[in-house]
Amino acid sequence: MRTPNVPESFLRFPTSTLLATPGSVRVLRELLESEVPMAVSALAESTGLTPQTVRNALGPLRGGGIVEQLGEGRSRLFRPDVGHPLYLALGSLFHAEAERFETVMEALRAATENLVPAPLGAWIYGSVARGEDLPDADLEVALVTADEDVATPVGRLREVLEPIQDVQRIWISVVGLSPSEVRRLAGGDRWWNKATRPHVTIFGRGPEDLAEELARPTGRGRAFKR
């Protein structure tokens, strides 16, 4: 994305400068959530940015007055200026961002645990699990059913999740796996590896534990241990 050639008034549109780059957003988010001032090295570690990118982001944030510096040289620390007129509004923005994510996660957990019969496990995989999802990415969910009937619980879960998708402006893609499919795929299938590494468990057991448990001889009439 190219930087606009014509600058905007900082007095009228300060967020165009304060939130101009992904680096600025990451650094400001971290500082607003931190209870203590942070050094460049700590900000780099927590945001996944290089120290130089953090310094570049701090420039306009300090220039705009939303971030202040404590100390000099190697002992420099940074914190948000709580007296800035946009401090509360920007903090509310990041709070709403985190709250939306938690709402989506909780809705997924509730929808999954209310399925009858209860599935053996469910997890998020793909770009969301990696933290690399773009605006048009699906939230990919793998659901391991309690028996060989995959279509019924997957259809029910998709139905329950429709209102969440509409409200939160997301698309949730659900892939169902039966116990026999887990046994077959967990032996080194390429899709299974992509769908489990990394993953975020949202219900029941994670993929590694499920694969290990389902691979054991169950014995006649023995139920799967939840």
Image (cartoon, helix red, strand yellow):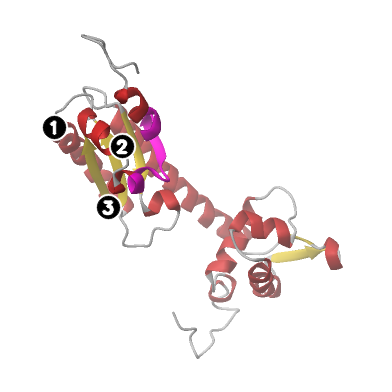
Q: Secondary structure at mark 1?
A: helix
Position of the N terminus by quadrant: bottom left
* Amino acid type, callout 1: Thr
Under tag 2, what secondary structure? Answer: loop
Residue 56 placement (x, y as % from top left)? 66, 74
Look at discs 3 and 1 and give the one toward the viewer.
Answer: 1
Q: Name the residue carrying label 3.
A: 171
Q: Secondary structure at mark 3?
A: loop
Q: Which residues are magenta?
A: 193-209
| Badge 1 density bin: few <14, some 14–19, many ≥20, Cα 10 Å | few
Image quadrant where residue 60 sits: bottom right
**Viewer-nearest residue: 163 or 145:** 145
Foreground pick, 198 / 27: 198
Q: Position of residue 5 (x, y in %)?
A: 50, 90
Residue 175: name its quadrant: top left
Dot 2 corresponds to which residue? 187
Q: Amino acid at mark 2?
A: Gly
Q: Residues within 10 Å of mark 2 (few under 14, many from 20)?
A: few
The disc, 3 or 1, on the residue closer to the chain's N-terminal end is 1
Q: Which residue carries the number 1 mark?
A: 152
